[in-house]
Amino acid sequence: MNKPSNTFDIAIEQAFDFLSPEYAALFDSSAATAFQHPLWLDSLYARLASHAGATPLVVVVRRRTTGALAMVLPLLRIRRGPIRTIEFADLRVSDYLAPVCSPEVFASVLEDEAACAEIRRLVRPFDLLRMTKLPDGRLPIESLLGAPRRVSMETNAYATVLVAPFEQWRASALDRSYQKELAKKYRQLQKKGALSFSCCDDSASISEAMDAMKQYRGPRFHAQGDGDLLQRPEYYSFYSDVAARGLGSFVRLYAMKMDGGVIAAVLGLRHRGSFLVIMSAFDIDGYKSQSLGSLMFEQVARDCIERGDQMLDFTIGDEPYKKLFGGQPSPMWMVTQAGSTAGAISLFALKQAPWLKLAAKRLSDFRLLPARTPTPTR
């Protein structure tokens, strides 16, 4: 039997309250990302986990002497086909994943062999431990879990540094010819009617923008052969809930309108001087030659600079437009560990046959579909 830690008490709290004052204080002092924010995780566990057949696995570390919250690992148990997996709370909505604690506390837990052993015991059993979308190595989750060294993912995240005034940032971030092209298209767009750009500030404007995003994203993602999450009721509910509860503090939802109707929208999170883009949609059919997406992001950058933001983070994905706006790539990392023969076979197959990754993703997507739905949601 493992000797218990003298410093920390460690337990699984499936019903952990992410809206509690103690978690808010922990998050504020942590090195976690926007995707571990209290509102984000509260809504994710409440609105998405059950639809995915996932069970909360919230590892909570407290100071033994005071009971004070020291670290939280927001995880999930979920079956991917026959494989029992342990993952960060993601479910295809989070871009950056990290333990919720300060680097100092993480180092203290890591040095406590008994604490590490207890955490590793609590997350078992599993066939496959799968931690993706790790932004850097400041908090080496693999060392905490006794997993193999992290490896680079096949995609990057992109962010551009913002400087005031807007004109200075625009001149330094965008190629001169691209600046002229966007200026020309913006003038053309203004001639089509009454054009406006604003940040949603009430429930009615949120609902209007979210409905427009759902409308524009559906055909676009269907044409690409991949269903759009926003078309699924539980995901629409999740994003709408986060937008409504976080408006004015944690969330911004931008809308561009033509003659009063939404033609473009961008949903993002505000965190420590950065604005993180998580979802966008544009009336591409109605404005095919206007580069509506680029014009929208240019206006988003302007507003962020005026608000004092220091970074516009386009998050994960290697889409070309991100570099056009001065986005610089940052590598993303993943940690995997087999916990059984079945998990070892699955992990080996994925590494040896890249085409299986697509099959695994489709299996994952299928698992995320609502159970017993009479009609397809994709």
Image (cartoon, grey):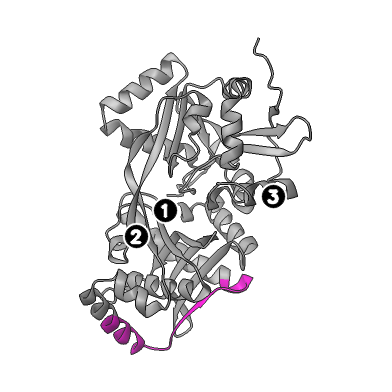
Q: Is residue 355 left or right of residue 145?
A: left
Which quadrant, please, contains the N terminus? top right
**Res 177 quadrant in image:** bottom left
Q: Is residue 13 visible?
A: no
> In the image, what residue type sits under mark 3?
Ala
Whole-percent x, y for residue 48 in the image: 57, 45
Question: Which one is in front, 75 or 306?
Answer: 306
Where does residue 316 sit, x and y in percent of width and height?
Answer: 39, 51
Label placed on residue 220: 2
Residue 56's spot in the image, x, y percent?
A: 62, 35
Which range of residues does the magenta coloring cover? 183-205
First in sequence: mark 2 or mark 1? 2
- Give yes or no for residue 195 being in the magenta stretch: yes
Q: Secondary structure under badge 3?
A: helix
Quick one: SS at disc 2?
A: helix
Amino acid type at circle 2 is: Arg
Going by the numbered disc 1, the residue's amino acid type is: Asp
Disc 3 crowd, CA 10 A, few/some/many (<14, 14-19, 20+): few
Label 1: which residue? 228
